[in-house]
Image: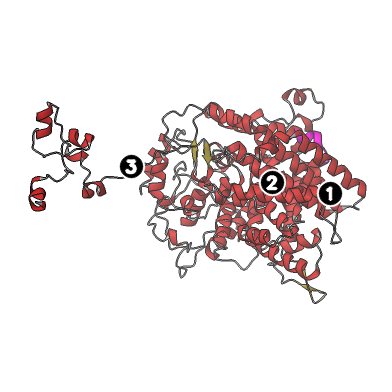
Amino acid sequence: MDEIRRQTTPVRSKKGCLTCRSKKVKCDEQISACGRCRRLALKCEWATASQSRGRDKARSKPRPAPKKILPNVHYAHLDIDVNYSRGTTSGEITDDAGMPAERILAANGTTGIEEFITYSGTNTAAALDDWYQELGFPSDFLDIGNFTAQANLDESPSESSSGPLFPLQVDANGESSLGAYEEHRATVLSAPWLATLTSPLNIFSPGLSTQNIVLSPSFAQTAAETQALHYYKTHFPTIMVTKNVRWSTHMVMLRHGSQTPMVMHLLIAASLMNLGASQHYDADICSAARGHSRAGVYLLIEAMNSSAEPDYLNVLTAFFFLYKYMAEQKNTNADAMIQFSHAVCEYVKRYNLDTLCTKSLLSCISSTEVTARVCLPRDKQECLARLIVWIFYEDVAASIRGLGGLLASHLCAEPEQTNEIYQCSTTNLESAWGPDYPESEIVDDIENGPILKFLYEVMMLYTEVNEVCRSSILVGDSDTIEAKLMKLEERSRFLFRLTTITTQPRSRLMINADYMVSNFYALRIYKFRCFHCNGVSAITPPEVQSSLTAILQIAQRSFSVKQQSQMIERFQWPLFIAGIETSDGIHKEWIRTKLKKMRLSRAFKRILEIQDKTGRRVSIPLVRQIMCGEGTALTGGEHQPLPSMVDGSVCFGQLVEGGA
């Protein structure tokens, strides 16, 4: 009976018609209409091949691609601006020049710093120039000349036994000997990503002409210079600013200085030194940077001492790049830095540049003084003001290390005039680019105006703290500066609130707020350390402790985004000062891993060793010496000299006086 039942009872179908399967009943699987559907006069439907639930078919089914989410954020390190609020409706990520981001990533095929220092494109200058004009620039945007397309990649600059600021041999016509090469040297740069390139054109940035680079008369361009220019165009500006690189002040300086050998030498020197520092001070890159700095310094000294009509803009541009070069050097020449700061300050005072860039045309016409009749067009005034402000920032940073600050002191002595200089500088980009400057960038400048003004006010307070440190510190001085800090914090509380918002990804305004408010908190800690210069173990005040916490919170959140490499660069000083003040060992170790600048990392380790052995804070004067490699370490209760880090080069001031 059971056997008969097994034979007559149909097996439940797994491949029956859809009608039977929907009712979960048996189907005899007779195509085209099964018995049940015929009996009940139902429509008999069958699954197609694509609807089959077979195991093999399911495995071969393609996975759905996730929908792209495009945040409203500026990726500075990729030169990409994703923006919905300013007319972008297509949802496509594009870079500043209108090139789809996917093409950039596909061309580079790399991550990290290689994204900025490699470029895979065509091997012809014509193709680059065509692409360059597609980006919307006029054909004469940059004339950077005498570029040799057949430059030998195996050439490398010779090293001089002189210090980093000693000029090259120069003949009566002022020709630099930079470009003398040693044939036995294998390559200009040892970077592994350069070994795959066959022509300097392969790493030339779109937006740079390959025809008219102007350097010293006898200089023959090599891959090092090509690489430096590309690095400058892509990565170098993003370390300092979050502005769209295409419309940044860095590109204005390159455009104006491209025909001036002095500017180009120092621009390349600063770019190469920054690149070399990011690669643990690669010997070949740093050697090429030193060669350009020597040639540039010679031409700068010549321009400063010339009896011809002074070229203020190019000289100040050269000052700025020389500051950047010296700040990135592995070992700081303290005497050279101090005398360089003095020379910059004297140049500004000699030509009254701080007054010149704020003087109206009407005041020039009505003035009775002959020297006061000198007046610049408004666009040049604004450019001059921007350069003075940026050099002021670099001088303040140098003064924190005890290596300058003379220009900062001069400007801080006239706060109202300095504020006028800053206000004049705020419209520099719009006037420099003219009608080509996009409206979206004007809106962006207005949005970021308050936070940039906040940074300026913070730097002025840094200068006041340094001025007090140079003189006898009184209790009243500390109270006065603390009152100014509290007033600035209260006036800018809406900017501080931006740093507490955890929204990701962050807009350019929020990124700027994170960095610049962190500098304010660092100022609070720095001021506390300065006014306890005897190294006593004072109890950390509540406002200093809260500043420590805020810096760590902001930094931790900032480093979790895609712009991490740039954010880490900008946070080096706040992290350093917070790290030597905190007593939390976990925080110290985390900060140590984030200090990418070798000089700061080395100083951080040495300062913590001293504080652990003595149980006391290291005073700011000693911190400065250690940062420059000239400090003293305490071992066994005695002061032991640190190894000298100064290379004995001739300082800038001696060069100006003709001592070299």
Mark 2 Cα-neighbour bin, 10 Å: few <14, some 14–19, many ≥20? many
Q: Report the residue marked by disc 1.
A: 467
Q: Amino acid at mark 1?
A: Glu
Instruction: In this rendered view, identify the residue nearer to me: 76 or 297.
Output: 76
Residue 416 drawn in magenta: yes
Q: Amino acid at mark 2?
A: Ser
Q: Amino acid at mark 3?
A: Pro
Residue 174 drawn in magenta: no
301 relative position to 135: left or right: right
83 relative position to 473: left or right: left
Span colored in magenta: 413-419
Majority secondary structure of magenta residues: helix
Image position, residue 341 (x, y; %) = 74, 51
Q: Report the residue marked by disc 2.
A: 518
Instruction: In this rendered view, identify the residue nearer to me: 260 or 560.
Output: 560
Looking at the image, is mark 1 or mark 3 earlier in the sequence?
A: 3
Viewer-side label of 2, 1 = 2
Image position, residue 433 (x, y; %) = 56, 31
Mark 1 Cα-neighbour bin, 10 Å: few <14, some 14–19, many ≥20? some
Image position, residue 44 (x, y; %) = 14, 31
In the rendered view of the protein, which quadrant contains the C terminus? bottom right
